[in-house]
Amino acid sequence: MTAIAELAMPISPGLIVILGGLLVPFLTAGIARVYVLLLSAATLVYVLGLPSGEHAAFTFMDLDLQLLRVDKLSTIFGTIFLIALFLGNLYAWHERDRMQRTAAQIYAGSAIAAAYVGDLVSLFVFWELTAIASVFLIWAAGTDRSFRAGMRYLIIQVGSGVILLAGVLFHVHETGSITFGHIGLGSIGGTLILLAFGIKCAFPLLHNWLQDSYPEATVTGTVILSAFTTKLAVYALARSYAGTEMLIWIGATMTAFPIFYAVIENDLRRVLAYSLNNQLGFMVVGVGIGTELALNGTAAHAFSHILYKALLFMSIGAVLFRTGTCKGSELGGLYKTMPWTTGFCIVGAASISAFPLFSGFISKSMILSAAGEEGHFITWAILLFASAGVFHHSGIKVPFFAFFAHDSGRRPKEAPWNMLLAMAVTAGLCIGIGIWPEPLYAMLPFPVDYVPYTAVHVITQLQLLLFAALAFTFLMRTGLYPPELRSTNLDIDWIYRRALPAIIRGLGSGIGVVWDSLIGGGRMLVSATIDGAARNFGPYGLIGRTVRVGNGVAWVATLLLVTLLIAYSAG
Amino acid sequence: MAEHPSSPIPGEKPRWLDQPRNVTKVVWALVAVCALLFLSDVLYEKHPTFAVEYLFGFYAIYGFIGSVGLVLAAKWMRTILMREEDYYDRDR
């Protein structure tokens, strides 16, 4: 036993959260809500004290597994994951559902464990566990829609894991190593693993599970979901595909195309899911550029993004919690009775828009600067456009249509105290990082030689953002701005929710037609045979009817003649 | 819409933003800030990475045109992509 204990020590913080989470079903809600806060806080303290290096390595079935690799990259993701879990647990304090609370701990624990593993087989195990644990946060909403969205989500997420496993098998065959380090393209294994990461990271055309499922989860579930799956994928990309040029183009596309959808989407949680996708694009570009500045930018932006995205989902979740809807067309004027939630939403909006003094400003700009330094002009121009665009839909549209705009006449109560407290702490972190970025910079994987607050940077960023605001105002005042409409906008999921089922139904009915005609033809043949037999052999048939003796002799004579003729001709 | 907000609850004290003229004040304040920002391009020395950044007020122009283009393009996309809210719930 001591040998096993020594091998597994120090234990992975992810395992602490998973094993700790398994206790939650046995606790009453009153104890569990305190317990999960303490569990995530204690694990956070534990993470910050972990010694660097490779621990908890053992051999299992000839595989060299390693559950705890502590370096700067795993530490920054482990740290922000635990902060997000703590804040998510605080936000869900009022929740009495044991299943959700348990699922949230196991899901977050798996993502944290995956960030610390040093081999691809362990990565696969925790990769799948995040998929399976997280779907319960979607199903917990209890609606038919959420059940179906959860099913689609589960199929795609588990599918990503299966592709990862296939890729790992090829990779082992090609290189003989299961180390979770740089992989790169150029082999079948490398390509399959990138595809698996790409699905979880919501690459263009592989993205739609995100906008499909997150808005269908529970109020508290979406906040938890927004933090882990996609950022785990960003982490995995940074680990294994840094400097893969294709990722620059994939990332740039990701920053741009979701914002068009975000402008016309009515469900504000879905708007946020589209903007989440857009923010992932910045991180993917950073991985693709692959310089120290770019990878620092990716890690820093993942850190700030998890906080401001959680804050935005928290504020719109509070609106959903109090009013029962988060559709832009049904909201408006809520600032009158939910002033605190309004304020926190605006902090999240300012952070995602990268206003000076807010967190996005000090992290996103590193990626843009890296793109500039490497001379990627088109990428830089796309990222700049996407920066203005994200301000448009997340920065202005979400707070504007929920809390201001046309007064909906709704006068909901302010959010519960625990939600307000969670939002206040998250907002404090967003502003804190924006004003004082040095502690975050010190956590980044490479030494930082970057100064975000220069006159040029502050002025140009304010020009970009405030003229985007001016454009919004101009479009609103002239009536050109598209109104919020109750609608569904077709995205890539149309292919698997409509086109493929239609094709399969078409194929099915085609097969049915062929089957029916074969069976029908067979039946006709059988009945024709029976009819013919009845005609010839029946009581009045040619052969079956009774005949007179003379006729019978004539028949016999005729047959004899024919037989003779055949016999002679044969002889 | 925003330019004509009104408080639909009778007897409720209207807020500052409920008055259309106050919303107009906010709009003019924004215009003033934007004008100042545009002109502040003379205040600092540029160290551009790309040649376009030499253009006076490049970021302002790019932000404005980009945003208007984004919204108008998205509005046009509705003609192709928009369906009823229960599109995926029908035929069930």
Image (cartoon, rainbow, N blue to C red):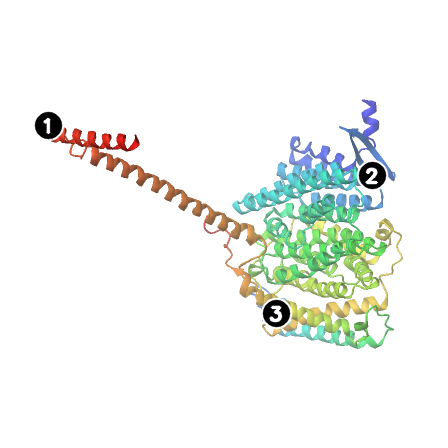
Mark 2: which amino acid? Answer: Arg
Q: Is residue A277 above or below residue A555?
A: below
Mark 1: which amino acid? Answer: Val
Q: Find the distance from the CA under tag 1 to the CA under tag 2.
A: 107 Å
Crowding at dot 2, Cα within 10 Å, few <14 / some 14-19 / many 20+, comes out as many
| Residue position marked by numbered label 2 in the rendering | A69
Residue A248, image x, y percentages: 75, 57
Q: Is the residue under label 3 in contact with that under label 1 (CB below 8 Å)?
A: no
| Residue position marked by numbered label 1 in the rendering | A549
| Residue position marked by numbered label 3 in the rendering | B72
Q: Find the distance from the CA under tag 2 to the CA under tag 3.
A: 49 Å
Chain on which label 1 sits: A
Crowding at dot 3, Cα within 10 Å, few <14 / some 14-19 / many 20+, comes out as some
User: Left of B56 or right of it: where is A129?
Assistant: left
User: Left of A562 or right of it: where is B47?
Assistant: right
In the image shown, does B13 or A372 lie closer to the viewer? A372
Residue A459, image x, y percentages: 81, 69
In the image shown, does A455 or B65 lie closer to the viewer? B65
Please name the residue shown 85% across and 68% down the image. A455
Residue A340, image x, y percentages: 69, 56
Chain on which label 2 sits: A
Q: Is residue A447 above or below residue A111?
A: below
Instruction: Kindly state the secondary structure of the residue where label 2 is placed.
Output: strand
Instruction: Kindly state the secondary structure of the residue where label 1 is placed.
Output: helix
Mark in the foreground, 1 or 2: 1
User: Left of A400 or right of it: where is A515?
Assistant: left
